Image: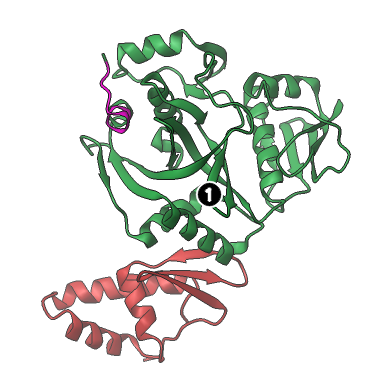
């Protein structure tokens, strides 16, 4: 499985835990929801989707695995669509 | 065609190519915005007449042109171009897509999207004793003492017809202030003392983020997290001269410098009653 990593050219502003991403090329501003922000933090080092799922399953053991996987995939799709991860 | 200039806090903004009908429509909306010599103009709004309408561009900022049908809408568009041009001339200024009303000496800034009902809320607050600052666009200047909102004396607009649920007292209030109308847009002509004049300023002490939803019930105020407040303000702000990082920093400062609430509500008139502590009679 391919490694996911933060896209280059993205500046981050942290406002009391809320993350805003500014793409330097387009000037677009993105606000990350909690799951997307957690993924961004987790991708300080490149990782793959399954490793992220394990990480989040350990962090949120009370959340059903299927729910967590769905939330993770949705957030990854949004981050990819925004060009914030590659 | 006319070549004119209008006074702004940063210097004159020239207007070129505007047909006289456009200036007349602008004057219906902005009767007190002073004209001035164009010497030392900080920017120029150019108007070209096309088959599809009036195209407006400004030398002050690099955003897509705007195309307006002739009439009050175009007059409103010219006001927007003048505001944006002087705002973009200084890092001290931003413009908020927001209403503002002075209630008991404090400026309430009400920010929200087109569906939030800013104009109706503005007039409802006015009918309950508030003083109108603006119903749509508020220039905000950063000073050493904090942010201040600037009034331009623009006449408020209401979408017509009013909702069925409109209180009779409100209907009577706006009927007594009926101004020019065009399609679904009706201008309101406030009476003496009901509206702040051009270049009046007040500190932004209270910022209310409007979240109007069907089924929301009675209006509720809550304190949003900083990030949520800034997220909601980003689409309401005009500040191309600051860049995205500068805009975020500026909005953070605005939120942190004011008492900021999120107001969730369904009915605009209930919201106005709650904000003023007065009832519709």
Query: Given the image, what chain letter belongs to the residue carrying mark 1?
Result: B
Left or right of B71, for residue B175: left
x then y, percent, for residue B78 = 69, 33
Q: Nearer the viewer, residue A28 or B84?
A: B84
* Quarter in which the N terminus of chain B is drawn: top right
Q: Is residue A21 above or below residue B141?
A: below
x then y, percent, for residue A18 = 37, 68
Tell me the SS state at disc 1.
strand
Query: Residue at horizontal 41%, vertical 88%?
Result: A44
* Quarter in which the C terminus of chain B is drawn: top left
Q: Which residue is label 1 attached to?
A: B147
x then y, percent, for residue B28 = 65, 18
- The answer to which quarter of the image holds residue B54 is top right
Q: How is the image coloured?
A: by chain
**Magenta segment: does it hold B277?**
yes
x then y, percent, for residue B166 = 32, 18
Query: Residue at horizontal 79%, vertical 45%?
Result: B43
Region rendered in magenta: B272-280
- The answer to which quarter of the image holds residue B46 is top right
Q: Residue furthest right?
A: B39
Q: Is residue B79 above or below residue A26?
A: above
Q: Nearer the viewer, residue B215 or B253?
A: B253
Label 1 CA crowd tier, 10 Å (few <14, some 14–19, many 20+) = many
Q: Is residue B155 above or below residue B255?
A: above
Left or right of B130, for residue B249: right
Q: Which chain is green?
A: B
Q: Is residue B210 above or below residue A12?
A: above
Left or right of A76, for residue A71: left
The hue of chain A in the figure is red
């Amino acid at each position: 499985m391919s490694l996911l990593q933060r896209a280059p050219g993205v500046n981050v502003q942290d406002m009391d835990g809320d993350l805003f991403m500014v793409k330097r090329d387009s000037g677009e501003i993105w606000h990350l929801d909690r799951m997307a922000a957690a993924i961004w933090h987790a991708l300080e080092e490149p990782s793959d989707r399954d490793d992220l799922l394990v990480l989040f399953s350990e962090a949120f053991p009370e959340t059903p695995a299927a729910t967590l996987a769905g939330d993770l995939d949705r957030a990854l799709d949004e981050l990819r669509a925004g060009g914030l991860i590659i | 065609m006319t070549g004119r200039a209008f006074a702004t806090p940063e210097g004159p903004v020239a207007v070129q190519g505007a047909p006289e009908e456009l200036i007349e429509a602008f004057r219906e909306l902005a009767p007190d915005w002073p004209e001035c010599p164009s010497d030392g103009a900080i920017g120029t709004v150019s108007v070209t007449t096309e088959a599809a309408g009036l195209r407006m561009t400004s030398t002050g900022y690099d955003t897509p042109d705007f195309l307006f049908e002739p009439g009050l809408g175009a007059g409103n568009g010219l006001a927007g171009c003048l505001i944006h041009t002087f705002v973009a001339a200084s890092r001290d200024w931003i413009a908020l897509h927001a209403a503002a009303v002075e209630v008991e000496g404090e400026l309430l800034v009400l920010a929200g999207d087109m569906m939030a009902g800013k104009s109706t809320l503005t007039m409802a607050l006015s009918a309950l004793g508030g003083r109108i600052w603006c119903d749509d666009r508020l220039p905000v200047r950063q000073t050493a003492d904090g942010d201040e909102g600037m009034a331009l004396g623009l006449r408020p607009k209401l979408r017509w017809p009013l909702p069925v649920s409109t209180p009779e007292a409100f209907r009577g209030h706006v009927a007594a202030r009926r101004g020019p109308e065009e399609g679904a847009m009706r201008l309101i002509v406030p009476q003496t003392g009901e509206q702040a004049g051009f270049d009046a300023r007040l500190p932004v002490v209270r910022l209310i983020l409007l979240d109007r939803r069907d089924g929301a019930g009675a209006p509720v105020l809550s304190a949003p997290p900083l990030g949520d407040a800034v997220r909601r303000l980003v689409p309401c702000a005009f500040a191309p001269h600051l860049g995205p990082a500068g805009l975020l920093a500026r909005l953070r400062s605005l939120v942190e410098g004011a008492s900021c609430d999120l107001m969730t509500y369904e009915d605009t008139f209930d919201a106005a009653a709650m904000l003023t502590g007065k009832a519709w009679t």
